[in-house]
Amino acid sequence: MTTVVPTSEEDPILSVVRFTAEMSWAEAGPEVAEPQVASLCLEAQDCMIAGRWFDLASLMLTSADLVFPKASDKDLECIFTIICNLVIKPESLDEMLEMAKLLSTKVAQQPNDKPALRLKILFNLYNLLENPYSRFYVYMNALKLAMNGKVIEHIIPSFKKIDSFLKEWNLGVHDQRELFLTISNILKEHKSSPKETFKFLTKYLATFSDEDAHTMEEAKEEAAYTIIEFVKSPDMFQHDLLDMPAVAQLEKDTKYALIYQLLNIFLTQRLDAYMDFHTANSALLNSHGIVHEDCIAKMRLMSIVDLASKESGQIPYHMIKDTLQIEDDEVEPWVVKAITAKLIDCKIDQMNEVIRVTRYTERVFGQQQWLSLREKLATWRGNISNVITTIQANKNYSRDISIQDSRTKVRTHTKNSCSYSYCFQFTF
């Protein structure tokens, strides 16, 4: 953040007003410029005395906007540091918010004129603010500036902190929706990480519920795009997209019903279903840039997972061969691929030509899977409770035996002592 060091007795605010006014009116000549500069300084002073900080910020922004193309980056950074510091002057949070909106909107208005500097100014403004929603508003303007000004690389690192930002901002559903959609659009534009784009798209889609039927219409295009990205991804095999209302609405949509059907195949069916779909809809797949060979490879892995979930832990080689539509000598390599992708854990029994599955990944994790997990956890909890009870019982038994042994030793020791005493007396 820029620090302004006063070099004269004049208030830094009035110095900035004077500097920007003189630069704005420089071409008009001294006779015209001097009265205008004096008038602006007087008006700024009146605002300061009356505590009209919003009016003062508006006045200063007007002049600063005029000199933006003329002044050096160093001067502009100094000017806007003084202007942005006005945001901490009001006592009312509402007025602070209005000033944050004014400042951030004005700075982001011309994204093609020194966009990197404008983004830096917005970051400085963000750090000055204490009100969470004011910070969110400034951040949204920074996102739009970065995208429109083609300086996306400066804003992308902040996406790693979005979860902590959300806790701080405490946003409503509509603001979250706008945030996630804007970030996903930026990542689409940057084309840097399809996984990150997919992550924020699914966050956006998750903000829609069944109660939002009248607004879900706007999510159709993004829902279809998200499905396509899931299908294309070579290493995404599990998701709860089918449970999202924003995605489920595509099932009966005239434009996107086939896209939904494709998702359903990838999450719940096997290779043969995909092959039938491709035969009937190859043009559709090509229009979305979906590569048929890549889909076959992905569906073969997902088909192995499906077999693992339905064959009681043992899958014969011939069943894998038929399901994956491969040759005999390709069975084991495909099983190894599934293990490498962490989709299954298993032992390959070459002698009996079966694989013995000890773990598999659920392709979808909806209500049924949660209930199954709940039952398993309850069983494990019961087993652990039984183990603890058994251990405790053994401890108590061992303690009782130990006490009994101690008592026996004490009695024996006492008896021996008495006998020794008697003998001693008899001898004496």
Image: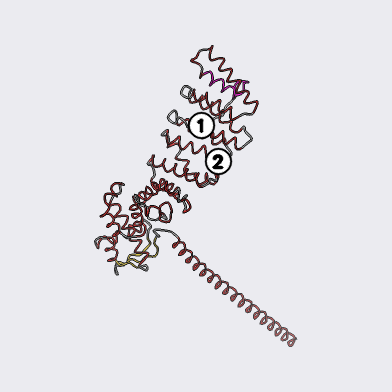
Residue closest to the far bottom? 426
Amino acid marked by disc 2: Tyr
Q: Residue furthest front?
A: 214
Quadrant holding the C terminus: bottom right
Vertical position of residue 172 compared to residue 52: above or below = below
Q: Are marks 1 and 2 in contact (CB under 8 Å)?
A: no
Q: Which residues are magenta?
A: 7-22
Q: Is residue 164 above or below residue 323?
A: above
The quarter of the displayed image where residue 8 is located:
top right
The residue depicted at 46 percent of the width and 23 percent of the height is 69
User: Tag 2, which secondary structure?
Assistant: helix
Indicate the position of residue 337 as horizontal and vertical percent values: 33, 57
In the rendered image, which quarter is residue 273 located in? bottom left
Q: Main secondary structure of the magenta part?
A: helix
Q: Is residue 390 left or right of residue 287?
A: right
Chosen colour scheme: secondary structure
Q: Residue at x 55, y 73 (%)?
A: 390
168 or 396: nearer the viewer: 168
Q: Nearer the viewer, residue 259 or 80?
A: 259
Q: Residues within 10 Å of mark 2 (few under 14, many from 20)?
A: some
Mark closest to the chain's N terminus, 1 or 2? 1
Give the camera-side residue of 227 and 300: 227
The image shows residue 420 at horizontal and vertical percentages of: 70, 84
Kindly identify the residue that appears in the image at 50 percent across and 47 percent down. Answer: 173
**Residue 315 horizontal/vertical position (percent):** 32, 66
- Identify residue for label 1: 121
| Numbered circle sitting on residue 133 | 2
Q: Residue furthest top?
A: 31
Q: Residue at x 52, y 69 (%)?
A: 382
What amino acid is at disc 1? Ile
